[in-house]
């Protein structure tokens, strides 16, 4: 961890075990950071509000345990105006966005910084990610040793100034080690389950979230190979490319392989055949470098939050556009997903671009 002596540190405390251990790790260095609980969600005073009493109780208990101040920062409206709007616009246009990626850029290191974080030198979170400083003093985002929990892909759209202020005190641990620290220290949330899915939804189903803001728009479901109509969908935004579960048609398994937004048709295939369900080559645009632009040729990448990294070469087209040439066939490549690019040894995260096909 970088030298923290004399630094003003804000910790984003969620009520979960990871951020609780962040406070413990800083306290072990003799530091007393200020803690903040961020309220986020699409609307004020809504049943969709994820600001549960239990989260606040946990966060309050952890802050009190280490003698830290805890303030609540309301980012409800910011989340709606920035992240939810981004998500709905992308989904309605037929893309597959990642709200959690944009939440890090726009809320945790964005809106929070505007409201309170600007008073601090560093903003600490419980992400499983690491950083390193090169010989020129530049800060790089690097992967966690825990391949399952690594969250660099969720951080691959933050700005360079946000990365310079970011601190990940538990990023060098495995998840089991974090749990063990919490249990050893008898932290109140040591055995609390990890949150799943989009940060503010809690137990709300993602499709219910989409239905609330976009409604339904029924259309035909057509078998790609034969042109045969096999059923009706309730809205193209309820389906993602590569989806298998939840299609609800007999005679399966079926895979969602293509959307025709103009005709409102969902194309599906029995096949897991390469020509319908897989791709090796796909373009990305608006590439966002985390630290500085670098020459990228032989790389590794991810297109979803999984433990594996895929080797590839990148073909440069200019203006932030590249073509990814993967060494293996990729299933479920969908427009709007972020392709997160790492060095050849999946150590440094260079940044990410949006898949355009």
Image: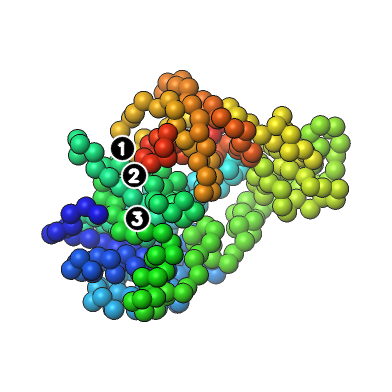
What secondary structure is found at the residue carrying circle 1? Answer: loop
In space, the residues marked 1 and 2 are separated at their CA atoms by: 8 Å
In space, the residues marked 3 and 2 are separated at their CA atoms by: 12 Å
Q: Residue 255: which numbered mark, if any?
A: none
Which residue occupies 77% across, 38% down?
Answer: 271
- Where does label 3 land, which residue? 172
- Where does label 2 land, which residue? 141
Which residue occupies 71% across, 48% down?
Answer: 244
**In-image side of 77 versus 26 (left or right):** right
Percent x, y for residue 312?
50, 30
What secondary structure is found at the residue carrying circle 2? Answer: strand
In space, the residues marked 3 and 1 are separated at their CA atoms by: 20 Å
**In-image side of 271 versus 157 (left or right):** right
Nearer to the camera, 131 or 285:
131
Tell me the mark number nearer the camera, choosing from 1 and 2.
Answer: 2
Tell me the mark number nearer the camera, choosing from 3 and 1.
Answer: 3
Contact flag, marks 1 and 2 (Cβ < 8 Å): yes
- Where does label 1 land, which residue? 291
Label 2 crowd (10 A; few <14 / some 14-19 / many >=20): many
**In-image side of 179 versus 245 (left or right):** left
Nearer to the camera, 291 or 176:
176
């Amino acid at each position: 961890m970088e030298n923290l002596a004399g630094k003003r540190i804000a910790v984003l405390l969620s009520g979960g075990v990871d951020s609780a251990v962040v406070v413990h790790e800083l306290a072990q260095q003799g530091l007393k950071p200020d803690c903040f609980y961020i309220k986020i969600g699409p609307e004020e005073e809504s049943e969709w509000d994820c600001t549960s009493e239990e989260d606040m109780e946990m966060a309050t208990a952890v802050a009190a345990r280490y003698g830290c101040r805890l303030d609540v920062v309301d980012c409800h409206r910011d989340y709606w105006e920035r992240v939810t709007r981004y998500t709905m616009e992308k989904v309605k246009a037929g893309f597959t966005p990642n709200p959690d990626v944009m939440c890090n850029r726009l809320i945790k290191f964005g809106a929070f910084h505007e409201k309170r974080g600007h008073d601090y030198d560093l903003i600490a979170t419980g992400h499983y990610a690491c950083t390193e400083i090169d010989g020129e003093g530049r800060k790089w985002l690097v992967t966690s040793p825990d391949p399952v929990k690594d969250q660099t892909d969720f951080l691959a759209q933050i700005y360079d100034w946000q990365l310079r202020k970011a601190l990940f005190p538990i990023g060098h641990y495995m998840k089991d080690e974090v749990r063990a620290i919490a249990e050893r220290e008898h932290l109140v949330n040591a055995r609390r389950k990890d949150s799943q899915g989009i940060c503010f939804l809690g137990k709300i189903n993602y499709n219910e979230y989409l239905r609330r803001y976009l409604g339904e728009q029924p259309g035909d479901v057509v078998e790609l190979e034969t042109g045969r109509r096999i059923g009706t969908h309730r809205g193209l935004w309820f389906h993602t490319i590569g989806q298998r579960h939840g299609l609800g048609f007999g005679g399966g398994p079926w895979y969602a392989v293509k959307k025709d937004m103009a005709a409102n048709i969902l194309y599906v295939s029995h096949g897991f055949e390469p020509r319908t369900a897989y791709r090796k080559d796909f373009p990305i645009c608006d590439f966002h470098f985390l630290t500085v632009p670098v020459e990228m040729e032989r790389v590794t990448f991810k297109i979803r939050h999984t433990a594996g990294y895929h080797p590839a070469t990148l073909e440069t087209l200019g203006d932030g556009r590249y073509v990814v040439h993967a060494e293996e066939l990729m299933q479920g490549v969908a427009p709007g997903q972020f392709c997160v690019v790492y060095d050849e040894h999946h150590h440094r995260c260079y940044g990410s671009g949006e898949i355009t096909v």
